[in-house]
Amino acid sequence: MPVDHYENFPVASVLLPRRLVPAVEAIYAFARSADDLADEGDATPEQRLAALSAYEASLARIERKEDGLDPMFTRLAATIAKYELPLRPFYDLLSAFKQDVEVTRYANYEALLDYCARSANPVGLLMLHLYGEADERNVRDSDAICSALQIINFLQDVAIDEQKERIYLPMEDLTRFAILPAHMDRPDNDAKWRAMMKFQVERARELMLSGAPLAVRLKGRIGLELRMVVQGGLRILEAIEENEYDVFRRRPKLEKRDWIKVLWRALRMRSAYL
């Protein structure tokens, strides 16, 4: 299970009410295709930024209630109108995708959280709006869960991101543990790497648990869906620990037996999270 905020969209989940499927599919299509513009293929940075700017222009046309949009944006406009969704989360996603084109390093944890606030948190916010649950407390906890999921994905994908010449580990943390960015996977760094990753895992777990009360407060399908997401993220962190923090030679992921454990833990989440 890659804990990625787009792969975690509950488009095909049996827990998603059928009435929300078209709306979630419309939002997913926007987010996934925009992310691909920033990441996939062999386009130049200038071409990627121009394509993302074109997406921003289409959002502006939706805001002005103009006709003549392409099919994907027509579906998105209908979803935004039907559920009275705010447009800011869509613009924030595009801002993060543009940042992916231009930024490959993050100086500190605060800078990484700022990126997560635009790359991940909008997804949770939009889902809360679809369910009519977007009050201040729920949004706060959703932001914590979504940022934690994004960071867990970064911890999973250190090796993959390195191949793209990106590092989502804060530079100040690498410096603190005396790890050079160009030599992260060197055998002589093993002890320092494990110490640094232990710090990252513990911080991500704390962030996830700070938002976990939302998964207990929300009732019905959305609550169970979210409890599965929370427990899935926590299980990935356990897998990183079980691999002794070696994410270069063995990418941590959830196997079938892990999903059974995730479901069991989700069903047993209690008021301790409240």
Image (cartoon, helix red, strand yellow):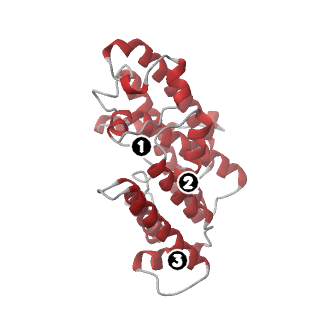
Relative to the observer, which residue lies in front, 252 or 95?
95
Per the rendering, the mark at residue 77 is 3
Q: CA distance from mark 1 to mark 3?
A: 28 Å
Relative to the observer, which residue lies in front, 266 or 210?
210
State the residue at coordinates (60%, 68%).
87
Instruction: Residue 18: give x, y in percent of width and height.
Output: 44, 68
Relative to the observer, which residue lies in front, 47 or 90?
47
Element at label 3: helix
Q: Earlier in the sequence, mark 1 or mark 3?
A: 1
* Occupied quadrant, residue 51: bottom left
* Occupied quadrant, residue 82: bottom right
Q: CA distance from mark 3 to mark 2?
A: 19 Å
Give the amino acid type for the residue marked by disc 3 in the picture.
Ala
State the residue at coordinates (37%, 60%).
12
Binning the other alpha carbons within 10 Å of mark 2 as few (below 14), some (14 to 19) or many (20 upward) gives many
Q: Are marks 1 and 3 in contact (CB under 8 Å)?
A: no
Binning the other alpha carbons within 10 Å of mark 3 as few (below 14), some (14 to 19) or many (20 upward) gives many
Per the rendering, the mark at residue 124 is 2
Q: CA distance from mark 1 to mark 2?
A: 14 Å
Name the residue tied to disc 1. Answer: 3
Instruction: Residue 207: give x, y in percent of width and height.
Output: 59, 35
From this viewpoint, is residue 32 visible?
Answer: no
Element at label 1: loop
Element at label 2: helix
Give the amino acid type for the residue marked by disc 1 in the picture.
Val
Q: Are marks 3 and 2 in contact (CB under 8 Å)?
A: no
- Say above or below: 88 vs 142: below
Q: Earlier in the sequence, mark 3 or mark 2?
A: 3
State the residue at coordinates (47%, 45%).
229
Give the quadrant of the C terminus: top right
